[in-house]
Amino acid sequence: MDGCVVLDRTLNVLGFGAKLQPGAPESNIKYVNPFTLAEDSELEARVGRLGTRHSSAFKFCRANPDALVIVVSQDGDVRIFIRNGSELAVVEATAFQPEMRGHLDHT
């Protein structure tokens, strides 16, 4: 199924298979490194090379203060888009290595 799962702050499901409609982007957004909070002027260009799913998440966060979007790619990469007030950051997580997967199984 394409689309996203939309949750509220208490993790109630508001939508499933939804398409993000970002709204008008705010112009005073500062792109920052999530760990140092230093300005990251290349963030928008990097996200633009990642595809539609990531671009939609980025645009949604630009238009919605306090948004958090988690993007899971088919190749296993996970990125978390976080907007906190006027700052927007992306946390990039690499795919789990096969030897790590066994440690995460609870079956």
Image (cartoon, rainbow, N blue to C red):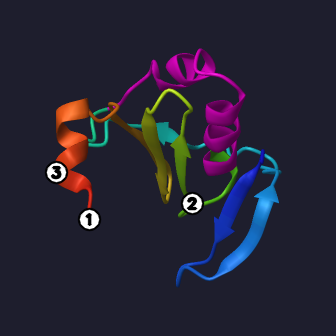
Residue at figure coordinates x 67%, y 77% from the top left:
13
Q: Say which element carries label 1.
A: loop
The numbered disc on residue 103 is: 3
Closer to the camera, 44 or 68?
68
As helix, strand or loop, the secondary structure at mark 3 comes to helix
As drawn, the label of residue 106 is 1
Q: Amino acid at mark 2?
A: Ala
Dots 3, 1 in contact, CB < 8 A:
no
Q: Position of residue 78 (x, y in %)?
A: 44, 39
Distance from disc 3 to disc 2, alpha carbons, whole Å, reads 31 Å
Going 45% across and 33% down the picture, which residue do you hit?
Answer: 76
Up/down of 76 relative to 87, above or below: above
User: Could you tell me what secondary structure mostly forms the magenta stretch?
Assistant: helix
Q: Nearer the viewer, residue 49 or 30?
A: 49
Among the two numbered marks 2 and 1 on one chain, the one whose residue lies closer to the N terminus: 2
Residue labelled with disc 2: 67
| Quarter residue 2 falls in | top right
